[in-house]
Amino acid sequence: MIEHGAHYIGGQSQASNGSDTIAVVNAATKEVMGSIPAGNAQDADEAVRAAREAFGSWSTKSPAERAGYLKRAAPTGPEPLPGRTDHRQSAIRCSPWPPPRPRPSKRAAAPAIFNWTRLGALLQ
């Protein structure tokens, strides 16, 4: 079972201030695959505070600068985010349908998984 016990707020993983969780359900089999923290008002306040702090410096950057940060923060390969396990293959294996065919990659296309940790490091 996949257990994620933290929120990503202000450039780092931090435990939820609440104890409630939300079940992650496999849409194909209806089996519970894991859980994520439900979060509470305090978690939301911390996320909003962190977003407001980040907005000041981010909003002064030109669109070209922002695009540069996003491109450098995008993953260069199929590796999962630091400290996380890539669960895509296990999710595909438990699906009753065949895996999707790989699509041709386009330079301008957004990456499937965005590395927010890498972006935070670039902005500091």
Image (cartoon, rainbow, N blue to C red):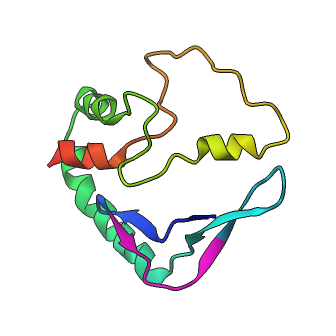
Q: Count every numbered label the image shows and give the total.
A: 0
* Residue 21 shown in magenta: yes
* Residue 76 shown in magenta: no
Q: Position of residue 26 (x, y in %)?
A: 75, 55
* Residue occupying the point 60% across, 43% down: 88
Residue 53 to residue 43: above or below: above
Q: Which residues make up the magenta segment?
A: 13-22
* Residue occupying the point 42% across, 41% down: 114
Residue 43 to residue 52: above or below: below
Q: Position of residue 76 (x, y in %)?
A: 37, 28
Judging depth in this view, the residue of 8 and 43 nearest the camera is 8
Q: Is residue 17 left or right of residue 54?
A: right
Q: Position of residue 102 (x, y in %)?
A: 64, 20
Q: Position of residue 42 (x, y in %)?
A: 41, 82
Q: Is residue 86 left or right of residue 98?
A: left
* Extreme residue in the left direction: 124
Q: Is residue 114 left or right of residue 51?
A: right
Image quarter of residue 47: bottom left
* Residue occupying the point 44% across, 43% down: 80
* Residue occupying the point 37% across, 68% down: 48
Quarter of the image with the N terminus is: bottom right
Q: Is residue 15 left or right of residue 20?
A: left
